[in-house]
Amino acid sequence: MTLKICNTMSGEVELFKPRVKNKVTIYVCGPTVYDYSHIGHGKTYMSFDLITRYLEYKGYDVKYVVNITDIDDKIIKRANESGMDPLELAKKFEKTFHADMHALGIKDADVYPTVSGHIPEIIEIIQTLIKKGFAYVVDGDVYFTVSKVEDYGKLTNQTLDAIKSGARVGVDERKQNPADFALWKNSKVGEPRWSSPWGEGRPGWHIECSAMSTKYLGQQIDIHGGGRDLIFPHHENELAQSEAYSGKKPFTSYWLHTGFLTINGEKMSKSLGNFITIIDLLDKWDAEVFRLFILSTHYRKPVNFTQKTLKHQKQSLQRIYNTVDNLRLQIQNAQELETPDKMEEELQKQISRVKETLINAMDDDFNTPKALSEFYNLIKIGNKAIAAKMSKSTLTKVLNTIMEIAHVFGLLEKKREIKALPEEIQILIKERDMARNRKDWKKADEIRLKLKSMSIILEDKPEGTQWRYQE
């Protein structure tokens, strides 16, 4: 199957065709750095981490840009409350954002541009928009004229009249149209400011992304992403000003947006007391447990965070690691067959079929729930190969396939010491298997309890008995 992506613009799943063969440009709106990153950020950037990993797996040369908004009303407000310089406050939380992303196992983007580092580029675009008649100056402020854009509202499928009627009461009377938005703001006392042709001030929110995406990816990009909450007004306005600036060149080929994350069915907020930072998350849960939780729901769908769900994912992750550990141990002692028997041949075919089905799922708009289901089938095949004491080539093939897909998912990245079972424990497991075969359940339970006292946990599966070290 060829890769298909659901485009927010059309609402349809479309065939993916990058502008330049084998190359993909991606711009994702980054955080406004005025506070610690929360698990909603984790969902968004982990989702796009998966997307970039899969595109690279498919052989694309990916250029990935995530901006940092370090100039914003929220930053200024928080800085005033704490007595810090706004840019110093932003720098502090920018550092914690990067630390959090690394802790989550999210690969670095190619560029993390900041707004404060791109003021000249922002001013240049605003000047061009004014010259073209798409913007106007009022008392040191610059506004974008939405009425000059014939198809304004096309990303969200809204008419300009509908957008105007939805504008808040008390809108700035200096605007030509209630829906016009700020490109440049005349600075107030105590705010960061830069010199411009319209006086000292600072950029508006939307213009920053047009400037930074254009600088690093050009006037046309393949994929633009972010959380669903950014579709309007941020992405709608970014789209309008970018195409006005470029002369109606299509700004983005595919718009991708991640679904919301809720906590126990409620919106996350400090007022509800359910605000979970990434630091808080990782204090209790492993990063790969959270990643498995994110993968279990399609990136466009909402996901509900509960302790019960994460506990379930923790158990699933442990089973995956146990299988991989056991495969590696058995490969060390396995023999190579000159001619694989029919059972081995069939199992190797199963591995190839499952991998193909998994890739087809990922090609269908990055359908991770379905792909993850196939990944678990690979784990089952691995356990069958272990229980049947198959040849080194079969064991190696299933292990390599598991690790290949796990890297795309961002799983199994931790280095673990593989400890072989002491001989006395191996003997006890064999004795228990023999007891079960003769239906001596009392003896089997006694051995299970004895092994548990030695920190060995047994799990009876259709493909055979599996063991793991107790956590």
Image: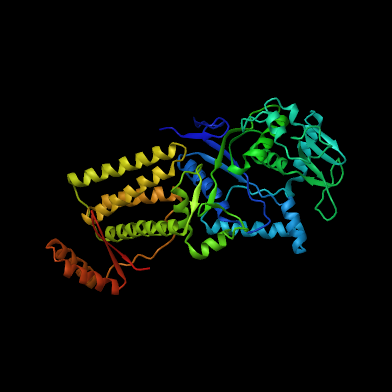
- The answer to whether one can see residue 212 in this image is yes
Of the 4 image quadrants, the one containing the N terminus is: top left
Return the residue found at the far front: 169
* Residue at the image position 56 percent from the left and 41 percent from the top: 257
Position of residue 237 relative to residue 289, above or below, is above
Q: In this view, does 129 lie to the left or right of 406?
A: right
Return the residue found at the far top: 150
For the rendered model, the colour scheme is rainbow
Q: Where is residue 248 in the image (x, y as percent from the top left)?
A: 68, 27
Which of 159/101 is in front? 159
Quarter of the figure with residue 389: bottom left
Return the residue found at the far left: 438
Which of 249/134 is in front? 134
Q: Position of residue 216 (x, y in %)?
A: 65, 41
* Residue at the image position 73 percent from the left and 40 percent from the top: 168
Position of residue 195 relative to residue 176, above or below, is below
Q: Position of residue 57 (x, y in %)?
A: 45, 43
Of the 4 image quadrants, the one containing the C terminus is: bottom left
